[in-house]
Amino acid sequence: MATTTKKIGDTKHWLRTAATLMEALPYLRRFSGKTFVIKYGGHAMGDEKLAEAFANDIVLIKQVGINPVIVHGGGPQIGDMLERLKIKSSFVDGLRVTDQDTMGVVEMVLSGQINKQIVSSINAAGGRAIGLSGKDGRLIEAGKLRRAQRNPDSNIEKVPDLGFVGEPTRINPDILSVFAKSDMIPVIAPIGVGADGETYNINADTVAGAVAQAIGAAKLVMLTDVKGVVGANGELISRIGAEQARALLADGAVTGGMIPKLETCLAAVDSSIEAAHILDGRVPHVLLLEIFTKHGTGTMIEADGAASS
Protein backbone atom coordinates (compact mmCIF):
# COMPACT_ATOMS: atom_id res chain seq x y z
CA MET A 1 0.00 0.00 0.00
CA ALA A 2 1.34 3.43 -0.95
CA THR A 3 2.14 5.85 1.83
CA THR A 4 0.79 9.42 1.62
CA THR A 5 2.76 12.16 3.36
CA LYS A 6 1.55 15.62 4.28
CA LYS A 7 3.78 18.64 4.54
CA ILE A 8 3.37 20.92 7.55
CA GLY A 9 2.99 23.89 5.21
CA ASP A 10 0.09 22.21 3.42
CA THR A 11 -1.66 21.48 6.71
CA LYS A 12 -1.34 25.12 7.81
CA HIS A 13 -2.76 26.24 4.49
CA TRP A 14 -5.76 23.93 4.87
CA LEU A 15 -6.32 25.14 8.43
CA ARG A 16 -6.32 28.75 7.24
CA THR A 17 -8.82 27.81 4.55
CA ALA A 18 -11.06 26.12 7.11
CA ALA A 19 -10.83 29.16 9.39
CA THR A 20 -11.82 31.44 6.51
CA LEU A 21 -14.84 29.29 5.74
CA MET A 22 -15.91 29.34 9.40
CA GLU A 23 -15.55 33.13 9.47
CA ALA A 24 -17.79 33.38 6.41
CA LEU A 25 -20.49 31.08 7.80
CA PRO A 26 -22.54 33.66 9.76
CA TYR A 27 -22.53 36.01 6.78
CA LEU A 28 -23.63 33.21 4.45
CA ARG A 29 -26.56 32.55 6.76
CA ARG A 30 -27.44 36.20 7.17
CA PHE A 31 -27.39 37.20 3.52
CA SER A 32 -28.91 34.12 1.93
CA GLY A 33 -31.94 35.20 -0.10
CA LYS A 34 -30.94 38.90 0.02
CA THR A 35 -30.26 41.11 -3.00
CA PHE A 36 -27.05 43.09 -3.47
CA VAL A 37 -26.74 45.81 -6.11
CA ILE A 38 -23.13 46.04 -7.28
CA LYS A 39 -21.81 48.97 -9.29
CA TYR A 40 -18.94 47.67 -11.44
CA GLY A 41 -16.51 50.01 -13.13
CA GLY A 42 -13.11 51.62 -13.03
CA HIS A 43 -9.80 49.77 -13.33
CA ALA A 44 -11.35 46.48 -12.23
CA MET A 45 -13.37 46.37 -15.44
CA GLY A 46 -10.41 47.08 -17.70
CA ASP A 47 -7.96 44.56 -16.25
CA GLU A 48 -8.38 41.01 -17.61
CA LYS A 49 -7.36 39.19 -14.42
CA LEU A 50 -9.46 41.43 -12.19
CA ALA A 51 -12.42 41.03 -14.54
CA GLU A 52 -12.06 37.25 -14.33
CA ALA A 53 -11.87 37.41 -10.51
CA PHE A 54 -14.97 39.61 -10.42
CA ALA A 55 -16.92 37.16 -12.58
CA ASN A 56 -15.92 34.26 -10.32
CA ASP A 57 -16.93 36.23 -7.23
CA ILE A 58 -20.35 37.01 -8.72
CA VAL A 59 -20.95 33.34 -9.56
CA LEU A 60 -19.96 32.31 -6.02
CA ILE A 61 -22.22 34.95 -4.47
CA LYS A 62 -25.14 33.71 -6.53
CA GLN A 63 -24.31 30.09 -5.70
CA VAL A 64 -24.51 30.70 -1.93
CA GLY A 65 -27.98 32.21 -2.22
CA ILE A 66 -27.33 35.95 -2.63
CA ASN A 67 -28.97 37.65 -5.62
CA PRO A 68 -26.45 40.00 -7.29
CA VAL A 69 -27.68 42.77 -9.60
CA ILE A 70 -24.84 44.40 -11.53
CA VAL A 71 -24.86 47.96 -12.88
CA HIS A 72 -21.78 48.83 -14.91
CA GLY A 73 -20.10 51.97 -16.14
CA GLY A 74 -17.77 52.48 -19.07
CA GLY A 75 -16.51 56.07 -19.28
CA PRO A 76 -12.96 55.26 -20.48
CA GLN A 77 -14.23 52.85 -23.15
CA ILE A 78 -16.71 55.48 -24.38
CA GLY A 79 -13.91 58.05 -24.54
CA ASP A 80 -11.71 55.67 -26.54
CA MET A 81 -14.47 54.97 -29.06
CA LEU A 82 -15.32 58.67 -29.47
CA GLU A 83 -11.66 59.39 -30.12
CA ARG A 84 -11.46 56.61 -32.71
CA LEU A 85 -14.54 58.00 -34.47
CA LYS A 86 -13.16 61.57 -34.19
CA ILE A 87 -16.22 62.78 -32.28
CA LYS A 88 -15.35 65.57 -29.87
CA SER A 89 -16.83 65.53 -26.38
CA SER A 90 -16.63 67.77 -23.35
CA PHE A 91 -17.46 67.56 -19.64
CA VAL A 92 -19.38 69.75 -17.22
CA ASP A 93 -18.91 68.94 -13.52
CA GLY A 94 -17.67 65.46 -14.45
CA LEU A 95 -20.63 64.69 -16.73
CA ARG A 96 -20.09 64.07 -20.44
CA VAL A 97 -22.09 66.47 -22.61
CA THR A 98 -24.03 64.06 -24.81
CA ASP A 99 -25.36 65.21 -28.17
CA GLN A 100 -27.16 62.92 -30.63
CA ASP A 101 -23.97 61.54 -32.20
CA THR A 102 -22.33 60.99 -28.83
CA MET A 103 -25.45 59.28 -27.49
CA GLY A 104 -25.29 56.75 -30.31
CA VAL A 105 -21.72 55.85 -29.36
CA VAL A 106 -22.53 55.75 -25.63
CA GLU A 107 -25.37 53.30 -26.19
CA MET A 108 -23.32 51.16 -28.55
CA VAL A 109 -20.43 50.87 -26.10
CA LEU A 110 -22.45 50.45 -22.89
CA SER A 111 -25.34 48.28 -24.06
CA GLY A 112 -23.28 46.41 -26.62
CA GLN A 113 -19.53 45.99 -26.17
CA ILE A 114 -19.14 46.34 -22.39
CA ASN A 115 -22.41 44.73 -21.34
CA LYS A 116 -21.80 41.63 -23.42
CA GLN A 117 -18.21 41.32 -22.23
CA ILE A 118 -19.36 41.21 -18.61
CA VAL A 119 -22.15 38.76 -19.42
CA SER A 120 -19.72 36.50 -21.28
CA SER A 121 -17.21 36.57 -18.41
CA ILE A 122 -19.83 35.56 -15.84
CA ASN A 123 -21.16 32.81 -18.11
CA ALA A 124 -17.62 31.53 -18.69
CA ALA A 125 -17.18 31.33 -14.90
CA GLY A 126 -20.22 29.05 -14.66
CA GLY A 127 -22.99 31.58 -14.05
CA ARG A 128 -26.06 32.47 -16.09
CA ALA A 129 -25.94 36.19 -16.78
CA ILE A 130 -28.24 38.22 -18.99
CA GLY A 131 -27.52 41.71 -20.31
CA LEU A 132 -30.07 44.48 -20.01
CA SER A 133 -30.29 48.10 -21.03
CA GLY A 134 -32.46 50.46 -19.03
CA LYS A 135 -34.58 50.68 -22.18
CA ASP A 136 -35.52 46.98 -22.00
CA GLY A 137 -39.04 46.78 -20.62
CA ARG A 138 -38.63 50.46 -19.62
CA LEU A 139 -36.50 49.23 -16.72
CA ILE A 140 -35.05 52.72 -16.21
CA GLU A 141 -37.36 55.62 -17.02
CA ALA A 142 -35.47 58.90 -17.14
CA GLY A 143 -35.72 62.62 -17.66
CA LYS A 144 -33.24 65.24 -18.73
CA LEU A 145 -30.73 66.13 -16.03
CA ARG A 146 -30.79 69.80 -15.16
CA ARG A 147 -28.08 70.89 -12.75
CA ALA A 148 -27.56 74.54 -11.91
CA GLN A 149 -24.09 76.10 -11.87
CA ARG A 150 -23.30 79.24 -9.88
CA ASN A 151 -20.82 81.77 -11.28
CA PRO A 152 -18.45 82.55 -8.37
CA ASP A 153 -17.89 86.12 -9.62
CA SER A 154 -21.45 87.21 -10.40
CA ASN A 155 -23.22 84.71 -8.09
CA ILE A 156 -25.65 84.09 -10.95
CA GLU A 157 -26.93 80.56 -11.51
CA LYS A 158 -27.33 79.01 -14.94
CA VAL A 159 -28.37 75.57 -16.10
CA PRO A 160 -26.02 74.22 -18.80
CA ASP A 161 -27.49 72.03 -21.52
CA LEU A 162 -25.91 68.60 -21.15
CA GLY A 163 -27.82 67.14 -24.09
CA PHE A 164 -29.01 63.57 -23.55
CA VAL A 165 -27.66 63.24 -20.03
CA GLY A 166 -30.45 61.96 -17.83
CA GLU A 167 -31.42 61.00 -14.31
CA PRO A 168 -33.74 58.17 -13.26
CA THR A 169 -37.35 59.11 -12.64
CA ARG A 170 -38.59 55.57 -12.10
CA ILE A 171 -37.11 52.07 -11.85
CA ASN A 172 -39.38 49.17 -12.80
CA PRO A 173 -38.74 46.65 -9.99
CA ASP A 174 -41.00 43.94 -11.46
CA ILE A 175 -38.46 43.12 -14.16
CA LEU A 176 -35.67 42.51 -11.66
CA SER A 177 -37.89 40.52 -9.29
CA VAL A 178 -38.17 37.87 -11.98
CA PHE A 179 -34.39 37.34 -11.91
CA ALA A 180 -34.27 37.17 -8.11
CA LYS A 181 -36.47 34.06 -8.28
CA SER A 182 -34.27 32.37 -10.90
CA ASP A 183 -30.63 31.44 -11.42
CA MET A 184 -30.14 34.38 -13.79
CA ILE A 185 -27.83 37.31 -12.96
CA PRO A 186 -28.91 40.67 -14.46
CA VAL A 187 -26.19 42.97 -15.83
CA ILE A 188 -27.54 46.48 -16.46
CA ALA A 189 -26.18 49.17 -18.77
CA PRO A 190 -27.01 52.66 -17.41
CA ILE A 191 -29.11 53.79 -20.36
CA GLY A 192 -32.54 55.28 -19.67
CA VAL A 193 -35.64 55.88 -21.75
CA GLY A 194 -37.67 59.10 -21.71
CA ALA A 195 -41.40 59.63 -21.82
CA ASP A 196 -41.33 60.03 -25.60
CA GLY A 197 -38.80 57.26 -26.21
CA GLU A 198 -35.68 59.41 -25.96
CA THR A 199 -32.46 57.67 -24.97
CA TYR A 200 -30.50 59.05 -22.01
CA ASN A 201 -26.96 58.54 -20.78
CA ILE A 202 -27.06 58.21 -16.97
CA ASN A 203 -24.25 58.10 -14.44
CA ALA A 204 -23.78 54.45 -13.39
CA ASP A 205 -23.39 55.31 -9.70
CA THR A 206 -26.74 57.11 -9.80
CA VAL A 207 -28.42 54.18 -11.54
CA ALA A 208 -27.01 51.68 -9.04
CA GLY A 209 -28.32 53.73 -6.14
CA ALA A 210 -31.76 54.15 -7.73
CA VAL A 211 -32.01 50.43 -8.52
CA ALA A 212 -30.98 49.47 -4.98
CA GLN A 213 -33.66 51.70 -3.50
CA ALA A 214 -36.36 50.57 -5.93
CA ILE A 215 -35.90 46.85 -5.25
CA GLY A 216 -35.20 47.14 -1.52
CA ALA A 217 -31.70 45.69 -1.77
CA ALA A 218 -29.91 44.67 1.41
CA LYS A 219 -26.67 46.25 0.24
CA LEU A 220 -25.34 48.70 -2.33
CA VAL A 221 -21.73 47.95 -3.25
CA MET A 222 -19.66 50.36 -5.34
CA LEU A 223 -16.33 49.32 -6.85
CA THR A 224 -13.97 52.24 -7.37
CA ASP A 225 -10.32 53.02 -8.08
CA VAL A 226 -9.62 54.13 -4.51
CA LYS A 227 -9.42 52.15 -1.28
CA GLY A 228 -12.56 53.74 0.17
CA VAL A 229 -13.46 56.87 2.13
CA VAL A 230 -10.49 58.45 3.89
CA GLY A 231 -10.55 60.95 6.73
CA ALA A 232 -8.69 64.24 7.06
CA ASN A 233 -5.65 62.30 8.30
CA GLY A 234 -5.56 60.22 5.11
CA GLU A 235 -6.47 57.00 6.92
CA LEU A 236 -9.11 54.65 5.54
CA ILE A 237 -12.42 54.78 7.40
CA SER A 238 -13.64 51.20 7.52
CA ARG A 239 -17.06 51.93 9.01
CA ILE A 240 -18.97 55.20 9.20
CA GLY A 241 -22.44 56.37 10.20
CA ALA A 242 -24.57 58.64 8.05
CA GLU A 243 -24.15 61.70 10.28
CA GLN A 244 -20.37 61.40 10.29
CA ALA A 245 -20.33 60.89 6.52
CA ARG A 246 -22.37 64.06 6.02
CA ALA A 247 -19.93 65.93 8.25
CA LEU A 248 -17.04 64.81 6.05
CA LEU A 249 -18.88 66.14 3.01
CA ALA A 250 -19.70 69.45 4.70
CA ASP A 251 -16.11 69.92 5.92
CA GLY A 252 -14.66 69.31 2.48
CA ALA A 253 -12.71 66.26 3.68
CA VAL A 254 -14.23 64.26 0.81
CA THR A 255 -13.40 65.61 -2.65
CA GLY A 256 -13.64 64.88 -6.36
CA GLY A 257 -15.42 61.81 -7.64
CA MET A 258 -15.87 60.43 -4.12
CA ILE A 259 -18.47 63.14 -3.38
CA PRO A 260 -21.27 61.77 -5.64
CA LYS A 261 -20.42 58.19 -4.60
CA LEU A 262 -20.77 59.01 -0.93
CA GLU A 263 -23.95 61.01 -1.59
CA THR A 264 -25.41 58.01 -3.43
CA CYS A 265 -24.52 55.72 -0.53
CA LEU A 266 -26.14 58.10 1.95
CA ALA A 267 -29.33 58.22 -0.10
CA ALA A 268 -29.31 54.41 -0.09
CA VAL A 269 -29.02 54.00 3.68
CA ASP A 270 -31.57 56.77 4.19
CA SER A 271 -34.02 54.63 2.21
CA SER A 272 -33.64 51.70 4.66
CA ILE A 273 -30.98 49.77 2.74
CA GLU A 274 -28.93 47.96 5.42
CA ALA A 275 -25.54 49.29 4.33
CA ALA A 276 -23.60 50.71 1.43
CA HIS A 277 -19.98 49.83 0.66
CA ILE A 278 -17.27 51.67 -1.27
CA LEU A 279 -14.50 49.25 -2.25
CA ASP A 280 -11.23 49.28 -4.15
CA GLY A 281 -11.98 47.25 -7.27
CA ARG A 282 -8.24 46.89 -7.92
CA VAL A 283 -8.01 44.37 -5.05
CA PRO A 284 -8.65 40.80 -6.28
CA HIS A 285 -11.80 39.24 -4.74
CA VAL A 286 -12.56 42.46 -2.87
CA LEU A 287 -16.28 41.60 -2.90
CA LEU A 288 -15.71 38.38 -0.96
CA LEU A 289 -13.34 40.05 1.50
CA GLU A 290 -15.87 42.76 2.29
CA ILE A 291 -19.00 40.62 2.44
CA PHE A 292 -17.73 37.47 4.16
CA THR A 293 -15.06 38.65 6.61
CA LYS A 294 -15.37 40.48 9.91
CA HIS A 295 -13.09 43.41 9.15
CA GLY A 296 -13.75 43.85 5.42
CA THR A 297 -11.44 45.85 3.22
CA GLY A 298 -13.20 49.09 2.20
CA THR A 299 -15.65 51.56 3.74
CA MET A 300 -19.10 50.60 4.96
CA ILE A 301 -21.69 53.38 5.32
CA GLU A 302 -24.73 52.67 7.49
CA ALA A 303 -27.62 54.50 9.09
CA ASP A 304 -26.87 56.04 12.47
CA GLY A 305 -27.46 53.53 15.26
CA ALA A 306 -27.37 50.55 12.87
CA ALA A 307 -25.68 47.35 13.94
CA SER A 308 -25.15 45.77 10.52
CA SER A 309 -21.87 44.21 9.46
Image (cartoon, rainbow, N blue to C red):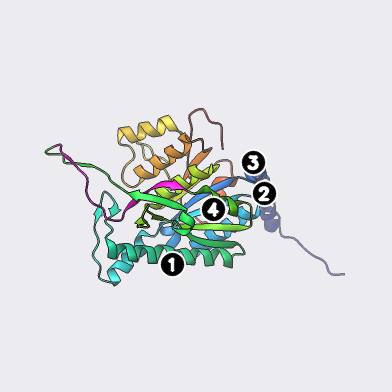
- Of marks 1 and 4, which one's residue comes earlier in the chain? 1
The answer to whether residue 243 is above or below residue 186 is above
Residue pushed farthest top?
Answer: 305
Query: Magenta span has 162?
Result: yes
Discs 2/1, front: 1
Q: Are marks 3 and 2 in contact (CB under 8 Å)?
A: no
User: Residue under circle 4?
Assistant: 175
Q: CA distance from mark 3 to mark 1?
A: 36 Å
Please tell me which of labels 3 and 2 falls first in the chain. Answer: 2
Residue at mark 3 to residue at mark 2: CA–CA distance: 14 Å
Q: Residue at x 56, y 35 (%)?
A: 308
Q: Which residue is mark 3?
A: 30
The residue singled out by tag 1 in the image is 112
Q: Secondary structure at mark 4?
A: helix
Q: Residue at x 16, y 41 (%)?
A: 151
- Counting residues from the N terminus, which is met first, the one under dot 2 or under dot 1? 2
Q: Is residue 147 left or right of residue 31?
A: left
Label of residue 204 in the image: none
Task: Work out how far the residue at label 4 is from the one at label 3, CA to CA, in angstroms.
Answer: 25 Å
Instruction: Return the residue nearer the eye: 181 or 304.
Output: 181
The reply to whether discs 3 and 1 touch (Cβ–Cβ < 8 Å) is no
Horizontally, residue 161 falls left or right of residue 200, namely left
Q: What residue range appears in magenta?
A: 155-171
- Residue corresponding to mark 2: 21
Amino acid type for the residue under numbered disc 1 = Gly
